[in-house]
Structures are given as C-alpha cells and as structure tokens.
C-alpha cells in the first residue's frame, strides 16, 4: 500500500474544504460531511459485457465471489449500447452519445470526469485495457476483423483534461502492483473475448477467477474491487450484476438498493473524498454494504454548499 507522510497540497486543500463544509452544515442543521477521503485508499472497477443479472450470478467463480462479497439485486445499466454506459461509469454522463461511433461526436470533451477530478485533488488513477496497442493510444480498434480492443469501452481516451499516459495496456497492472504503485482509482477493461462480448460466459468467468483474487489482494485492507457489467443481454430490462469485493464490505450480502452506473460514480467520489459531479451528484449514497461505519456525503449536500460558497 502506498503511503506518504503528508498528502499533496491539492489534497490537503480538498480535505480542508471538507472540514469547513462540515462546520457550515452543522450551522445549517444539515448532516455533517463525512471524512470520506479516509474511507478507502484504492478502488478497482472491472467492467464486463452484455449479460444479465441472472445469466452471470450463477457462474461458478462469480457465484463464489458473491458469497465472499456484497452484491446488488437491483443494479441497472442506463441504456444500450456499450459506449454511453462506459461514459456514465467514467463521467456520470452519456456525453450525448447514443451509439458506438468512434471517435464519439463532439470529442475530445473538456468536461468533468473521474480522471480529471482525481488529478486536481492529488489522487492517482490509471485505466488498464487488454490489447490496448500502446499507452495513450487513440485507435478505434485493434486485433483484426474481430478486434479484441475497441475504444468504445475506453471513455477516458475521449477527454482533453486528463493525463493520457495513464491509459495503459492491461499487462502493466501486474507491474504496478509488483512495484507497490497501485493508483487510488483503477479501471480494468478486459478484451472482447474475456469480457464475454464475443466469447462464452465460461471464458469470462475463468478470466475473473484468474484475475480478481490478485486485485482484491492488491487493494489491501482499505480497498475495494467493483465488478459490474456495462449492460444486459437486451432482454432483462438492463438489470445487471454489480459486486463489491474486498475487506471493506460485508460478506455474503445482497443489497436491494436500486443503483445505476451513476451510483457507482457517486460511491467512488464518496469513498475517495471527491465531490460528486454531473448526474452522480443526484444519486443517494450506498450505505448498507460496508463492513465498518462509513458515512458518505448525503445527496444534495454538495449542491447546498455550492450555493453557500457563491454568496
């Protein structure tokens, strides 16, 4: 686990702002802003493809992971096809995309996203994608007539306000873990076979069994691994499986809270101590799966504070 004696100056300022916000909330009789920046050190988000809740929860490894973790019975993607869902997981917005066109219309986008938000608050992030041909590559596909890498699953490429050298081939994840250099926020995108887009469910379940345990170990005692699907099979109302794994969550727990991809972004912000943004700011916090007392910032709190600061 990466430790520094003193957080970087931007993060100290961000945490100081949270403390000030707490005093303002107390004066207004509102819930105190939690010190969410200390809740979790590392979050890894793994995104699979195109299968419903009932299709994947019974797979051998996935079922065993559920038993060790917390999962959600009412988790929903936003819309087909893939690209808008990946944008919602990264920027809490579809950016107006309705298809998988590459490059997406209007990109590169200058708007807020998790990568930029981490950078301006002194946190680290990287995205690791299987079969990405090179760090920071902008290619739309890689791998021939049945491409294993497709940019539609890598939304960070389409933003102008983040560090593109943080977009890495998946093989770099093991190197960073070995060097004790795991970022605070990680997104993992398996290729189009391992994510079950083009290959059997058993292939994806095997990939997860070969990779998720090392991720859970790497995030340490104050870490979280999120496993989710971009969308369903087109026949289940976009109901998908989402699993929270690691020592910071309850085991063998199924939450009935209704969540979407926006909820995942809200949780990431709350657990890393970042202000919720875009559509994530309107989502209620996830509160019923944590293994210790964690009080995320309440929905609406940040909006009230922005109004105060503008006065």
Image (tube, rainbow, N blue to C red):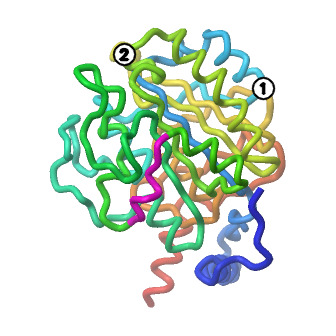
Residue 84 drawn above or below residue 24: above
- Mark pair 2, 1: CA separation: 28 Å
Q: Does the magenta stretch include residue 12?
A: no
Can you give x and y, in whole percent of width and height, for residue 187 in the image? 52, 45
Q: Mark 1 sits on what residue?
A: 68
In the image, taking residue 240 as reference, residue 220 lies left or right, namely right
Can you give x and y, in whole percent of width and height, for residue 214 in the image? 71, 34
Residue furthest to the bottom in view is 311
2 and 1 marks in contact (CB < 8 Å):
no
Residue 143 drawn above or below residue 301: above
Q: Which mark is residue 189?
A: none
Give the residue displayed 58% in from the left and 80% down from the top: 10
**From which residue to which does the magenta span run?**
162-169
Query: Looking at this view, is 25 or 176 the one in front?
Result: 176
Query: Looking at this view, is 83 or 160 the one in front?
Result: 160
Quarter residue 242 falls in: top right
Residue 20 showing in the rendered view: yes
Give the residue displayed 66% in from the left and 10% down from the top: 60
Residue 96 drawn above or below residue 7: above
Q: Mark 2 sits on what residue?
A: 198
Check disc 2: other Cα within 10 Å, few if <14, some if 14-19, many if 20+.
some
Can you give x and y, in whole percent of width and height, for residue 100 in the image? 23, 35
In the image, taking residue 136 as reference, residue 241 lies left or right, namely right
Give the residue displayed 82% in from the left and 52% down from the top: 293
Q: In which quarter of the image is the N terminus?
A: bottom right
Can you give x and y, in whole percent of width and height, for residue 157 in the image? 33, 52
Mark 2: secondary structure: loop
Q: Which of marks 2 and 1 is nearer the N terminus?
A: 1
């Amino acid at each position: 686990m990466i430790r520094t004696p003193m957080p970087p100056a931007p993060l100290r300022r961000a945490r100081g702002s949270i403390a000030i916000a707490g005093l303002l909330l107390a004066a207004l009789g509102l819930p105190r802003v939690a010190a969410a920046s200390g809740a979790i050190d590392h979050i890894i988000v793994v995104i699979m493809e195109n299968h419903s809740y009932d299709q994947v929860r019974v797979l051998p490894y996935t079922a065993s992971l559920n038993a060790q973790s917390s999962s959600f019975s009412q988790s929903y993607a936003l819309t087909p096809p893939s690209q808008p869902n990946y944008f919602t997981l990264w920027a809490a917005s579809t950016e107006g995309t309705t298809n998988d066109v590459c490059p997406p219309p209007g990109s590169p986008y200058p708007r807020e996203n998790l990568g930029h938000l981490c950078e301006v608050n002194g946190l680290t992030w990287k995205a690791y994608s299987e079969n990405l041909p090179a760090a920071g590559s902008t290619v739309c596909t890689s791998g021939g007539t049945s491409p294993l890498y497709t940019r539609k699953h890598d939304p960070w490429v389409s933003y102008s306000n983040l560090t593109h050298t943080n977009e890495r081939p998946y093989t770099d994840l093991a190197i960073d873990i070995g060097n004790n250099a795991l970022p605070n926020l990680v997104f993992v995108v398996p290729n189009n076979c391992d994510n079950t887009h083009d290959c059997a469910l058993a292939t994806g379940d095997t990939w997860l069994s070969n990779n998720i345990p090392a991720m859970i170990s790497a995030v340490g005692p104050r870490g979280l691994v999120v496993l989710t699907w971009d969308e369903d099979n087109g026949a289940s109302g976009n109901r998908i499986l989402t699993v929270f794994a690691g020592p910071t969550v309850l085991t063998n727990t199924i939450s009935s809270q209704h969540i979407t991809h926006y909820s995942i972004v809200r949780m990431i912000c709350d657990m890393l101590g970042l202000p919720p943004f875009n559509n994530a700011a309107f989502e209620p916090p996830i509160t019923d799966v944590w293994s210790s007392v964690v009080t995320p910032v309440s929905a609406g709190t940040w909006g009230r504070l922005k109004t105060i600061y503008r006065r």
